Image (spheres, helix red, strand yellow):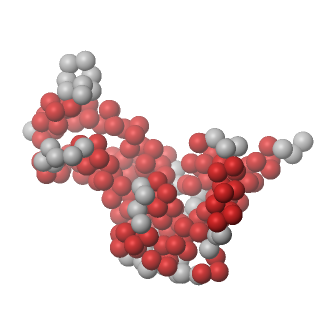
């Protein structure tokens, strides 16, 4: 798989392992937009996302010698970026207690069906902005469950919360997103 006309991914990885800045820059440029979209989902602003992606790439460069060549290199890097985002969320919410389990807050399945119809009226930038508006704890659980497809058990382990808190935070995140996005739709139809 060639990343540009003359340098393959393998050459770039090997160059990065040797600490060559030109190869690090090529790797950064190739994967910036992919990983920026991940970082934006975990932060409140583009500025925070840029800080997060730069920190993630520093970790990638520092650990690239650990990549064995087994499995997808992009997947290996993505895991570092996501774990960095999780660490970021933990640090930001360290002074705040993660929300506790509240079974009354769970959404029912009929609302799940409404979500797919509802989201079709909204563009991706508006959805991203709404996700960025969630609290750190809600945003972290939402991203890990919906975007990264972690189980509630895995989320609980990663964030140091209970499975119930993970489920509750997801339900509350969905409810808050629905409210924010419904408000956007309502504004469009007001004459």
Residue lying farthest to the left in this orientation: 18
Q: Is residue 107 above or below residue 31?
A: below
Instruction: Report the residue that reaches farthest toward the top.
Output: 5
**Apparent side of residue 141 relative to residue 13 in the rendered image (left or right):** right
Question: In what quadrant of the picture does the N terminus appear?
Answer: top left
Q: Kindly give the residue lying farthest to the right in the view shown.
A: 191
Q: Position of residue 30 (x, y in %)?
A: 32, 32
Residue 25 higher or lower than 62, as above or below: above
Q: Is residue 180 visible?
A: no
Task: Tell which of 190 and 157 is nearer to you.
Answer: 157
Q: Residue at x 54, y 81 (%)?
A: 101
> Which residue is located at x 32 percent, y 49 percent?
78
Q: Residue at point 12% right, 41% down?
A: 17
- Note whether residue 121 is visible: yes
| Residue 26, position as x, y percentages in the image | 26, 31
- The percent coordinates of residue 137 (x first, y second) are 50, 68
Q: Quadrant of the C terminus?
A: top right
Please state the horizontal and vertical placement of residue 160, each as a whole percent of the image: 38, 76
157, above or below 4, in the image? below
Which residue occupies 57% across, 55% down? 131
Q: How many marks?
A: 0
Report the front residue among 87 and 77. 77
Which quarter of the picture shows residue 13? Answer: top left
């Amino acid at each position: 798989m060639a990343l540009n006309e003359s340098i393959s991914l393998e050459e770039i990885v090997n160059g990065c392992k040797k600490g060559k800045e030109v190869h690090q820059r090529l790797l950064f440029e190739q994967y910036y937009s992919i990983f920026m979209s991940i970082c934006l989902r975990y932060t409140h602003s583009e500025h925070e996302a840029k800080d997060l992606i730069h920190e993630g790439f520093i970790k990638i460069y520092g650990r690239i010698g650990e990549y064995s060549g087994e499995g997808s290199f992009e997947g290996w890097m993505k895991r570092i970026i996501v774990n960095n985002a999780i660490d970021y969320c933990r640090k930001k919410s360290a002074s705040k207690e993660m929300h506790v389990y509240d079974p009354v807050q769970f959404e029912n399945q009929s609302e799940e069906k409404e979500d797919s119809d509802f989201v079709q009226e909204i563009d991706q930038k508006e959805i991203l902005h709404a996700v960025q508006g969630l609290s750190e704890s809600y945003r972290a659980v939402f991203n890990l469950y919906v975007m990264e497809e972690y189980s509630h058990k895995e989320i609980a382990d990663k964030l140091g919360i209970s499975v119930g808190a993970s489920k509750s935070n997801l339900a509350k995140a969905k409810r808050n997103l629905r409210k924010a996005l419904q408000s956007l739709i309502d504004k469009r139809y007001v004459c």
